[in-house]
Image (spheres, rainbow, N blue to C red):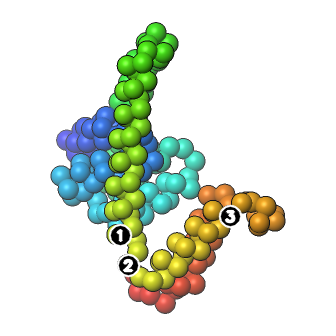
Amino acid sequence: MKEYIKILLAFLRVGLFTFGGGYAIIPVVERELINKRAWVTMDEVLDFYTVSQIMPGMIGVNLSLFIGNKQKGPFAGFLAAMGFILPGVTIISVVALFISNFADLPLVNHAFAGIRIAVAALILDTVLKLVKGVFKEVKTLLIYIFVFLISALPSGLLPGMVASPAFLVAISGLAGLVFFRNRQA
C-alpha cells in the first residue's frame, strides 16, 4: 500500500509542477522520477513518450499510465494518471471561477505572456535533451531530416498525402525497421 501512495504522491508533484503539457512534462519527470526516485530511465521515458504521442488523450496522462504501470502494475498506472490529472483539474477549476473577472486586466495578460515564455524555454530545454538522446547515429539524423522535410512541405506538394502525425510516425517506424532491423536490442 505504501508503494501505491508513493506513486500517487509523486505524480501529484509531477502534475502540480508541469505547466504547458506536451514536452513540458519531460523536465519534471526527469527531476522527480528519474533523478530523485530512479523509477525509469530517460530512454524509457522517451519510448513511453513516443507511444503516448500517437495514443488518444493527453500525453502526460498516457505517460503517467505507462510509468505507474511499469512500477507496480495497472492499478499504479491508474493512480499515477489520477495523480497527474488532479492538480491541473483543481487549478483549472479555481481559475475558471475567477478568470472572467480578471482576464482583461493588463497585469494578468503580462503574467500570461511571461508564462508562455517560460513554457517555451522548458520545451526548448527538452528538445535539446531529446536531440542528445536520439541522434546517436547518422541513420537517426537521416530519418529525422526526411520526416522533418515531409512535415514542412505544404500539403499541395504531396498530392493525396497529408503530413499528419500518424502518417509521420508510421513513416518513421518503417524507416527504423529498414535501418535498424539487424541491430541487437
Circle 2: element type:
loop
The image position of residue 3, as x and y in percent, is 22, 45
Circle 3: element type:
loop
Total numbered labels placed on residues in the image: 3
> Contact, CB < 8 Å: mark 3 with mark 1?
no
Q: In the rendered structure, which amino acid carries the disc numbered 1?
A: Gly
> Contact, CB < 8 Å: mark 1 with mark 2?
yes
* Front residue of this view, candidates 21 and 103: 103
In the rendered view, tell whether residue 43 sits above or below residue 83. below
Q: CA distance from mark 3 to mark 1?
A: 26 Å
- Image quadrant holding the C terminus, namely bottom left
Q: Which residue does the image show at 37% across and 34% down from the upper left? A: 115
Q: Mark 1 — residue?
A: 133
Q: Nearer the viewer, mark 3 or mark 2?
A: 3
The image position of residue 56, as x and y in percent, is 57, 47
* Callout 3 crowding tier (Cα within 10 Å): few <14, some 14–19, many ≥20: few
Q: Mark 2 — residue?
A: 136
Q: In the rendered structure, which amino acid carries the disc numbered 3?
A: Leu
Q: Is residue 140 left or right of residue 34?
A: right
